Structure formats: structure tokens, C-alpha cells
Image (cartoon, helix red, strand yellow):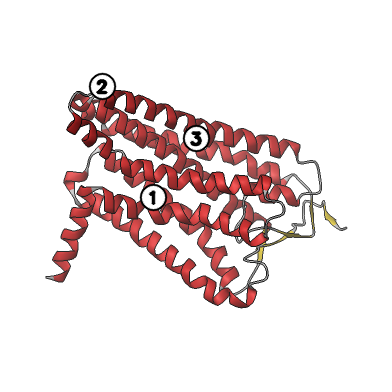
Amino acid sequence: MSVVNDSTLYPRFLLTGFPGLETRYGLISIPIFMVYATSIAGNITILFIIRTESSLHQPMYYFLSMLALTDLGLSTTTLPTMFSVFWFQAREIPFNACLVQMYFIHVFSIIESAVLLAMAFDRFVAIREPLRYAVILTNSVIVGIGLAIAGRALALVFPASFLLKRLQYRVINTLSYPFCLHQDLIKTTVSSRWVSSIYGLMVVIFSMGLDSLLLLLSYILILGTVLSITSKSERVKALNTCISHICAVLTFYTPMIGLSMIRRYGQNASPIVHVLMANVYLLVPPLMNPIVYSVKTKQIRDRILRKLKKHKV
């Protein structure tokens, strides 16, 4: 077994599509391309509508803009290697390029988790303190939240790349997916990986783990506030404002939990199942978020329809 331990040399990494289905990559790439196209078009539409409609310049829609930008970033980060594998069957990726892609995939994932938490806080304030909503969530507060979200993600993931670069690898390393993930890169190392593994676990705990607990706490507080409202119609109205956000949370966390379960307990599962779950984890949230918010949020839906009618005229 040859090992790369010279700092002047870099190991080679080979991405993996759907093992055993290489002859059908052209066909498989069609729905993947449609998902990417819909995701990018949908999120750009959300950003355009919020940008051009002054009535939507409110805290809720600013956070929605952050979510759309994050989804665009996640889509464009994975798109190049996905299509290099499925369209050109070009599996090799340079080590440094793999580290960069890994960095941004995890950064955008952590940002999305935090944005969903910020949106839960927004809903709590809107329901609990409707008269002080605009006073509490001012533009400067929202900018501060956005900077804190981005700063936390950038800082947490930054050391992971350097820890991985210090490890030793085989000359040729085969990854499990058509993109680079931290847990997948760690598996290929031939040197001690415990520092990188522990750091990766800490990042997950202090980002998505903490966010999920705070999300749960936010909805407990929201539910308590809603139940204290005397009018049934007002309770229903308050809960309806949370439906889109709940759908976004489920869309983000369900595939992530599914991927974690498959990785931990699905050793005997087909490699295709592992690749499929990883693709669902990264492709479904950017696809579904603009669809959910366009369908379930009346203000967004009405303005999209208005824009379409203007173009028809």
C-alpha cells in the first residue's frame, strides 16, 4: 500500500456516482439537472420578488432571503463535481479542490441550520410581541444576526481543512459520493484520525445539534404563546404563519438524520442507497424551500402571480 507523506505531493481523490449504473449516467443526470435548474430558478425568483417589492422589506422576508442565498450557495458548490461525474465521467478531483468544496458544503449547511433557527425566533417574536415586532427586529439587529450566522459557520469549519491536510492518504483514494464531505475524507486516511474525528463531532454538536435543540425550544415557546390566545381563529392564524417554516425545518433535518442513520447502521445497504441519501440531503432543501414558501406564503405567491401576469400582458 503506497502512502503519500511528502508535503510536496498530493493524493488523488476519485468521486463516485451510482456504482454499477455508469452506463445510465446520461439518463440519471436528467432529473438531477432538473432539480438543480428548479432550485436555482426558484431561489433567484424568491430573492428577486423580495428585492423588488418594498412591502416585503420586513424581518421575515429578510431571513427568507438569507435562506435562499444559502440554498443557492449550496447548489452551486456541489453542481460542478456532480455534472463532471454524471456527464463526463470525470471522477478525479485535486486534493485542494476537494478540501475547498468540503469547506463550503459544510459552511452552507451550518448557515442553513442557523438561518432556520433565526426564522423560528422571528416567528416567536411576531406571535409573542406583534406590536413590538418591528422594534425588536430592526434592520441593524437582522444584519447582526446574519453576520453572526456566517461568522460562526466560517470559523467552525475553517480548522477542519487544515486538520485533514495534515493527515496521510493513499496515492489514490475513492470517495463515496460525487462531492467531498468531511466524514468521507476522514475514512480515506491511513494515519491517526481521532483529532479530526473529534473536531468534526464537536462542530456538529455546537452547530446543528445546538440549533436543533433551540429550534425545539422555540416551538415549545411558540406553542405555549399560541395556546394562551383566547380566540380560536387567532390561534389558527398564528399557527398558519409557521407552516412554511416547519416544512423547511423538516426538509432540512429529515434527510440529514436519514443520511446519518444510513452511515451508522446501513453498512450492509447498497452503495447506491448511501449515494442517494447524500444527494437527497444536499439537493432536496434548496429545491423544496422556494416551492414551499411560494405556495404557502400568500404574499410571495401573490407577487409571483402578479409578475407573471404582467409578462403575459
Q: How far apart are marks 3 and 2 (CA)?
A: 35 Å
In the image, is residue 287 above or below residue 201? below
Circle number at residue 152: 3
C-beta proximity under 8 Å, tags 3 and 2: no
Q: Nearer the viewer, mark 3 or mark 2?
A: 2
Residue at image mark 2: 228
Q: Is mark 1 on a helix, strand or loop?
A: helix
**Residue 115 percent across, percent down from the top left:** 40, 39
Instruction: State which tag comes first along the sequence, 1 or 2.
Output: 1
Q: Which residue is drawn at 75% across and 52% down?
A: 188
Mark 1–mark 2 distance (CA, rounded to whole Å): 35 Å
Q: Residue at x 59, y 35 (%)?
A: 203
Q: In this view, does 216 lie above or below 79?
A: above
In the image, 312: left or right of 297? left
Element class at badge 3: helix
Element carrying mark 2: loop
